[in-house]
Amino acid sequence: DLNHDNKLDTDETWIFTATGTAVKGDYSNIGSVSGEGGGTTVNDSDGSSYFGADPKIDIDKVTVDGATSGDGLTILAGESISWKYTVTNLGNVALSGINVTDDQGVVVTADLVGGFNVGDANQDGKLDLTETWIYTGTGVAGIGSYSNIGTASGSFTDDAGHTANPSDTDPSSYFGADPQIKIDKVTVDDAASGDGISILSGEPISWKYTVTNLGNVALSGINVTDDQGVVVSPDLVGGFNVGDTNQDGKLDLTEAWVYTGTGVAGIGDYSNIGTASGSFTDDAGHTATPQDTDPSSYFGADPHITLDKKTNGVDHGLNIFQGQPVTWTYDVKNDGNVALSNVVVTDDNGTPGIGDDFHPAAILSGGFNSGDANQNGLLDVGETWHYQATGTAQLGGYVNNATATTDAYTDTAGHSRTPSATDSSDYEGYSNKALTQGFWGSHTDAWDNIPGNEGNPTKSAVKSGVLSSLDVNPSVDDPATVGVDESKYLLLGDANHNGLVDDDHNLWISISLAKSIESSSTSGDARVIMLQQAIAAQLNIDNGVAQPFNLIDEAVMWLKGQGAWASLGVNLDSNNDGFIDTNGAGTALAGPAVKTSSIAWNKYVDVIDPASGIADWNGGQEANGEGLKNALMWFNQDQLVTSGPGGNVGWFNGTTIIDEHPNTLDQFWLTLHEVGGLTGIK
């Protein structure tokens, strides 16, 4: 209104203004004007419009594990994962300058096709209203809870040059599963448990396997094995492991499951390894099978000793003459695997009672047992300690048993074991106390039954033990026999040397005749030759020397023509009165001499009694009269020797005693046969 007259003059343009706020989308309004001039009302109208731009952006972020995506997934830690960022336009105008970022520093890249985002359908570089643009970030799943936030932004500038930068955020998260398992294995011996404990071998033992969860997720499919084949079983309560407190069959984070294996302690070092495994599967179906191992060990103690006992260096079967020195040695060896203390050796002295038991002496060196190599006073593994005792050989079989012990060994659990070992050795004590025909011929006062008639040689022989008494002849007068004084006789065939006729093979000879025969020189009469050795043999028997069984009876049978010796032309008791036939004066044998060339002396006969169980040899022609005489002589000369009644008979070859047999019926013949090459014995 240039002239300020409140009239719209023809050259004027008046301005009116209204204000408001742009709304979204298309907007149109019409301005109307009216005026009055010259009585006429004039008017006009004009419309205008705008488009209310509403730039908006949306982001949807998810965590991707394989084919599975979403928020709050459980993912195995360490796995490759990605994040998918989906960006859409929620406004009404296309957006440019699209940018996606991640608050955890994840590098976010667009998924491109032909240089444009895969969702930019018209490839104009703008996020149009119908488009969905995709972005991706990658990483590795960590342990535990994880969350990151994706931010998407864009830009729009209107016609006035005003710019809006819409943005949106979206978080996503996952739980990084870290399945871990732990096993603790110990060896159990009663109240003792642990690793490296000492256990007595052979004892029942067990292994305890304690399984815990060191991860952050519960585990299923728990399995425990042992590398040595031990059968491992869960400790159950109500069908669930005793440590499964909520009985859900899963090893939870706070639980400790228990398993047990059993066995028997072996010898020496032993180690076995327990392995525990479990399973966890994440939301993508990926499975982890964590496992852990733990060894445990023990030492299987085997406290053990051996005892090696010998008699004169021989284990068993030693033949020795009575009266000879005997040395027993005792070797105690530690063949176990632990050192032992306080070795004690005891010998039973060959008797069942303990009153005469003795302890052999240790063989010492420098104050220690000679086998104590390191002189520490302990019977160490592999050491052999030595002990010794001495004695004198007795007549007959002798067996003594020794026992070696040590202090008990105690293992970690307090269990004790006392090592002990026994061993025996033996000998057969043979008599070498028989005296020759020459001795008896020169010591007739030792068997003449005249008290006080003994000379100094006989007395000395008694004192030295050669003779058992001043007069060995046991004969006494039998009142039942009228006209005969048996005390003036020697009884041949008196096997039990009691001076009595108590079997079918006895023969009385007057002492005077016997003395004459025994002290005479060699005769050509086979009867006298046989009697010389038979008298000496009988006197040896009367002196307490055990004869080869039935030997003196065999001699009487030859003298009387009995048994196998019948029909050979010899019978010194033709009237069968039990007394040797003599001449009228009683100073010589009756009848003619029997030559040593006769069949009585030279014919081989069957001397083996079937009752003996001995098989005949040489067609049942085993020995002749000379062989029988020689057997008597060998007995009298300590060549055919015995170890007493119930003992053995054998042959002494000047060094050792060989060809032993039980001293029973006719076994001496078998011994002589086995010696071989003996005159008169086949």
Image (spheres, helix red, strand yellow):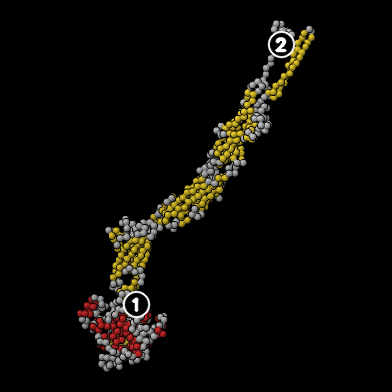
Taking the image as shown, residue 172 lies to the left or right of residue 326, namely right
Please provide percent x and percent y for residue 20.
67, 18
How crowded pointer 2 is (Cα within 10 Å; few <14, some 14-19, many 20+) is rated as few
Residue labelled with disc 2 = 13
Residue 485 shows up from this direction: no
Q: Which residue is nearer to you in this view: 314 or 148? A: 148
Q: Quadrant of residue 612?
A: bottom left
Q: Is residue 632 left or right of residue 181?
A: left
Q: Secondary structure at mark 2?
A: loop
Going from N to C along the chain, the mark reached first, 2 or 1, is 2
Indicate the quadrant where residue 626 lies. Answer: bottom left
Residue at the extreme front: 114
Q: Amino acid at mark 2?
A: Thr
Answer above or below: position of 186 versus 523: above
Q: Nearer the viewer, residue 158 or 412?
A: 158
Q: Position of residue 23 (x, y in %)?
A: 68, 22
